[in-house]
Image (cartoon, helix red, strand yellow):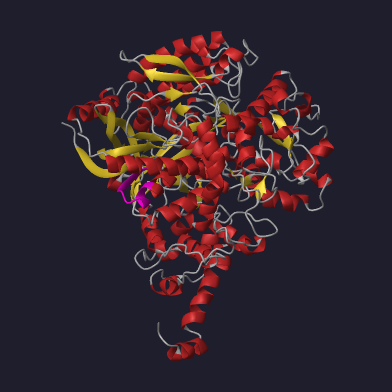
């Protein structure tokens, strides 16, 4: 057992600042365990979100030693405990208290994206037929646990605050899952370009690096979506075709 | 007078896991106004952790499957204490509910001919679980969430309900607070659906999240509703045991469904040593036959690892107690051995069990494709809960409905794996439908200010005692005690002392104090959850004391056999006029003749 120091962002608004806590840690503990121990031992008011404690719900997102991580999946034996472990809330969202950030913006963005609209059933009993190879690609996107770490790390949101014009990597993954769904018939390409602000992404791949579910966000979701937008709006042949295509 | 904000809906759904979301969608579809209260953020409820799949007799993999076999399996697993009306409805309606998810965008794993793939699971005769790798719960909650947000439902994220409000016999609203600001909220509604889940946080070793504090059970109890079958708590046989901080985290039954075998420290496949009578015609005679079953041989019987959870958990417990356990007090669960049988074993394991691979690699440093896992029982699910009408899901309190884990009946003495996700869908839908119907038939009731005042005073009382005991200390003491005394193996002496312990803990809970303000204060939330945990624990203990036999999830060391005199009733708990907990035995209605025949045909 060793005693470790945790430097945790504590408080609300202008009053918030780092506060140091000491607690004993043992083998196999994760950062969330240490936070829980601090709550139980010394600071019952210390606010953090968590649910499953197994990397499946995406609630306990935070910045640990400056890196966006899930607290429940960050083992203490991977950190240098001779130094204080710095734990902060996600910074791309408004702060509520201690380690809790206001992520409600993400829920609003999602609601504006056109929902799933399936084609007519393939079989008379109202069911569809899909091959596993056709669903594999979309299943990757559907692994997303909505931890919003990708949103937190994206510079378009974090540094340029384009929350009104840019939906962020999570919602590109969501849109990609809909667009590439074998049964979906909706068209979201114009929306991607005009409302989701896909063009702002300059594929720095920061989102992919922090994804705890290892979704290849940039390569598998964002770039194919960019290609669709280009095909539809910037391809000269398509543009010519559109001029002559009867409206309706 | 306390300050509070008021919201008004026709139907209020409390809880936003699978059952709550499905109920809200259904109610909303019938044209009434719906409020959905969730304790966490939307999409984070415990359903997200469900791994293996949802049971529905679609017969996509084995066409011998149908609702009758599913019904018989469910009753056999529940040791015939199930509400058979619910079991019949569940078996018949589950396939349609699963297909409905596909219509809303869920992407299940596929069969070779392009239909929904189904996998083997404990206690199910045929491959029956529609699944997505080992993250079926995530797929389900996300599908319901992404569909639900477009149905005009008002969602109250991070709100906790602490009391139900009544007008005479009937419920007419709920009282609670929002987490962010700690402000009080009053929800007026014509009917209420409880979908709050279970009570796992009453135990030290559990697969359940912080939300699982018996809120719905306690809300219903105080509102005068019956709780039933509370002695039946499922200890899932395979939770992680090491490192200590992950103890209890679930290891899906899907590992065994895909061929995983349980071994003791001697390398012995001990599950072959104890086959219960109810299943002796359904278990493989040797390892070879068990593997053929996993590989889909229709003439083979299941390996004994796929017996029901209550039985497997007890067998593991016995091995550990007999000194044949693994280094950290569990047994070994090995899936890596399938490399003896198939050439692409590591890829197959990663494809079928991706999150198990990930979980063990990251949290325990174990590569499940090359080495065995260490596992042991973990508190997982409560079969008991609010007693409801099998068709409408309404409790004995008019206007109060319950669905999912918080409701009792479908699972009897033991739940089959996979029957929970289908339960959420089938009975979530029914609860939503009937709650909406109730709301249409009945006007708004009268909200009684005095009830609001009482609830507000109770909620604020921990702030009056800034030097009171730390609520976490009381919670931990309760968890230790329930784990020791009302756990997987029970005795009269232990449980009697647990009742004394609960009386002491109740006093301690009444003296907890907290510091700080009302805004996002987990100490306060923990203090308020204590009362719910204590009600659920007391109901479980009293019911378990009364059942002097062993059946399903309830095992008595001092009464190890099933007994006829206990084979035909449910244990029911109600709050007496004096505020004390009252217990009665309620006879189970005789099974309909055609259903009796179904049971006979599937023996």
Q: Evaluate whether residue B519 shows in this view.
A: no
Nearest the eye: A187 or B576:
B576
**Relative to the observer, which residue lies in front, B260 or B382?**
B382
**Residue A108 occupies which quadrant of the picture?**
bottom left
The residue nearer to you, when weighing B181 against B406, is B406
> Horizontal and vertical percent for residue B207?
55, 34
The residue under the point 53% across, 26% down is: B204
Residue located farthest toward the top when viewing the structure as drawn:
B493
* B199 relative to B311 in the view: left or right: left
The answer to whether residue A16 of the structure is visible from this angle is: yes
From the viewer's side, name the closer residue of A80 and B31.
B31
Query: Which quadrant is the C terminus of chain B positioned in?
Result: top right
Residue B30: say if magenta. Answer: yes
* Residue B79 image-quadrant placement: top right
Q: Residue furthest left?
A: B1
Q: Which residues are magenta?
A: B27-38
Q: Percent from the top left, x then y, of residue B58?
A: 62, 48
Quarter of the figure that contains the N terminus of chain B:
top left
């Amino acid at each position: 057992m060793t005693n470790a120091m945790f430097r945790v962002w504590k408080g609300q608004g202008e009053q918030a600042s780092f506060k140091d806590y000491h607690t004993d840690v043992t083998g196999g503990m994760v950062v969330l365990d240490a936070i829980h121990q601090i709550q139980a031992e010394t600071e019952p008011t210390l606010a953090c979100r968590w649910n499953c404690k197994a990397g499946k719900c995406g609630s306990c997102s935070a910045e640990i030693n400056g890196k966006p991580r899930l607290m429940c999946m960050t083992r203490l034996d991977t950190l240098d405990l001779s130094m204080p472990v710095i734990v902060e809330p996600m910074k791309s969202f408004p702060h509520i208290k201690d380690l809790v950030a206001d992520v409600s913006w993400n829920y609003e963005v999602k609601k504006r994206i056109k929902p799933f609209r399936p084609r007519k059933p393939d079989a008379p009993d109202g069911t569809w037929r899909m091959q596993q190879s056709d669903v594999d690609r979309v299943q990757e996107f559907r692994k997303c646990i909505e931890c919003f770490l990708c949103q937190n790390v994206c510079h378009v949101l974090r540094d340029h605050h384009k929350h009104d014009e840019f939906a962020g990597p999570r919602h590109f993954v969501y849109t990609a899952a809909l667009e590439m769904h074998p049964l979906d018939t909706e068209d979201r390409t114009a929306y991607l370009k005009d409302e989701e602000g896909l063009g702002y992404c300059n594929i720095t791949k920061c989102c992919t690096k922090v994804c705890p579910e290892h979704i290849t966000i940039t390569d598998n979701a964002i770039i194919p979506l960019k290609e669709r937008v280009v095909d539809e709006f910037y391809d000269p042949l398509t543009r010519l075709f559109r001029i002559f295509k009867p409206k309706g | 007078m306390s300050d509070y904000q008021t919201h008004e809906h026709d139907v209020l759904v409390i809880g936003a896991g699978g059952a709550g979301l499905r109920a809200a969608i259904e109610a909303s579809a019938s044209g009434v106004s719906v409020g959905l209260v969730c304790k966490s953020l939307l999409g984070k409820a415990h359903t997200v952790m469900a791994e293996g799949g949802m049971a529905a007799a679609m017969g996509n993999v084995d066409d011998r499957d149908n609702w009758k076999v599913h019904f018989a399996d469910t009753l056999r697993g529940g040791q015939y204490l199930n509400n058979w009306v619910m079991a019949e409805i569940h078996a018949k309606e589950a396939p349609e509910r699963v297909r409905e998810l596909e219509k809303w965008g869920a992407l299940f794993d596929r069969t070779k001919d392009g239909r929904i793939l189904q996998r083997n699971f404990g206690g199910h005769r045929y491959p029956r679980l529609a699944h997505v790798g080992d993250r079926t719960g995530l797929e389900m909650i996300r599908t319901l969430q992404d569909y639900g947000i477009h149905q005009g439902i008002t969602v109250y994220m991070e709100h906790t309900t602490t009391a139900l409000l009544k007008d005479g016999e009937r419920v007419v609203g709920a009282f609670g607070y929002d987490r962010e600001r700690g402000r009080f909220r009053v929800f007026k509604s014509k009917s209420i659906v409880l979908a709050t889940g279970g009570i796992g946080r009453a135990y030290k070793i559990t697969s359940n999240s912080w939300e699982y504090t018996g809120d719905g059970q306690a809300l219903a109890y105080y509102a005068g509703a019956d709780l039933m079958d509370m002695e039946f708590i499922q200890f899932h046989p395979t939770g992680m045991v090491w490192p200590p901080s992950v103890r209890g985290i679930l290891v899906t039954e899907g590992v065994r469904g895909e061929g995983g075998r349980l071994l003791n420290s001697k390398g012995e496949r001990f599950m072959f040593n104890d086959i219960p009578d109810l299943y002796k015609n359904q278990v493989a005679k040797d390892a070879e036959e068990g593997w053929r079953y996993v590989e889909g041989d229709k003439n083979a019987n299941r390996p004994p690892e796929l017996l029901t959870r209550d039985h497997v958990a007890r067998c593991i417990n016995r091995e550990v107690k007999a000194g044949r356990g693994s280094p950290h007090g569990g047994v070994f669960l090995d899936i890596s051995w399938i490399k003896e049988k198939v050439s692409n074993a590591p890829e197959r394991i990663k494809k079928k069990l991706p999150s198990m691979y990930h979980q063990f690699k990251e949290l325990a440093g174990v590569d499940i494709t090359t080495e065995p896992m260490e596992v042991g029982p973990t508190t997982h699910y409560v079969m008991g809960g609010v007693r409801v009408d099998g068709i409408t899901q309404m409790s004995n309190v008019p206007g109060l409905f319950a669905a999912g884990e918080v409701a009792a009946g479908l699972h009897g003495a033991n739940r089959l794996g996979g029957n929970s996700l289908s339960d959420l869908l089938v009975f979530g839908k029914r609860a939503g439908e009937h709650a909406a119907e109730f709301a249409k038939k009945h006007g708004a009731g009268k909200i009684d200010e005095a009830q609001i005042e009482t609830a507000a005073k109770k909620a604020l009382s921990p702030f009056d005692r800034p030097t009171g005991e730390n609520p976490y200390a009381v919670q931990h003491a309760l968890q230790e005690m329930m784990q020791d005394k009302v756990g997987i193996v029970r005795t009269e002496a232990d449980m009697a002392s647990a009742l004394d312990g609960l009386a002491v803990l109740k006093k301690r809970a009444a003296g907890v104090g907290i510091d700080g303000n009302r805004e996002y204060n987990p100490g306060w939330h923990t203090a308020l959850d204590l009362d719910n945990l204590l009600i659920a624990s007391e109901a479980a203990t009293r019911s378990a004391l009364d059942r002097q036999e062993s059946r399903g999830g309830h095992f008595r060391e001092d009464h190890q056999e099933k007994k006829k005199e206990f084979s035909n009733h449910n244990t029911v708990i109600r709050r007496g006029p004096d505020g004390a907990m009252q217990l009665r035995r309620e006879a189970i209605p005789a099974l309909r003749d055609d259903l009796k025949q179904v049971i006979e045909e599937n023996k």
